[in-house]
Image: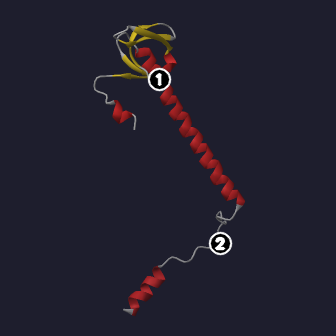
Amino acid sequence: MSSWLAVIAQAAPAAPGPTTPSPQPGNPFFFLAIMIALVAFMLLTSRSQRKREKRQRDQMYASMAKNDRVLTVGGVFGTIISVKDNEVVVKVDESTNTKMTFLKSAIQRIITDDQDLSKENR
């Protein structure tokens, strides 16, 4: 059994020689490098998320059409009567035929029949 230990000890690689010092956690440059990497990551992530949201919002504005049910940022439900360049006329009450004009940017979402608003507002 001791002969096996002798063979393993001889086959084990020698300890590495002196190398360049690795960054130590107490080193201020190490801390600064970590902080710069985190800030860069956060900026890149938020930028891509903003681009994706803008693309989805622009697509929603382009797809607005007459008779779509919408929800405004103020919480008003209605049906689109007409869509102009930057304006949307929405009928908010069927019985009194009340119409309101909103900017397209005031429309939060287009409501489809298969959407459940209670699930989306969580």
Residue under label 1: 57
Q: Is residue 85 left or right of residue 35?
A: left
Residue 16, by quadrant, is bottom right
Q: Write the residue at 34% across / 33% down.
A: 118
Instruction: Judge from the rendering whether residue 10 lies leftward or rightward of residue 94; answer left or right.
Output: right
| Image coloring type | secondary structure
Point out residue 121 in the picture as x, y percentages from the top left corner. 40, 34
Horizontal placement of 30 versus 60: left or right? right
Q: Amino acid at mark 2?
A: Pro
Label 1 packing within 10 angstroms: few (<14), some (14-19), many (20+):
some
Front residue of 20 and 88: 88
Classify 52 as above or below 30.
Answer: above
Which image quadrant is residue 29 in? bottom right
The residue under label 2 is 18
Residue 24 picture location, percent across and down: 65, 65
Residue 63: percent from left, percent from top:
40, 15
Callout 1: helix, strand or loop?
helix
Between disc 1 and disc 2, whose residue precedes?
Answer: 2
Q: CA distance from mark 1 to mark 2?
A: 58 Å
Residue at horizontal 59%, vertical 39%?
43
SS at mark 2? loop
Quadrant of the image containing the C terminus: top left
Which one is in front, 100 or 111? Answer: 100
* Amino acid type indicated by mark 1: Arg
Number of other residues with Cα within 10 Å of mark 2, as a class: few under 14, some 14 to 19, many 20 or more: few
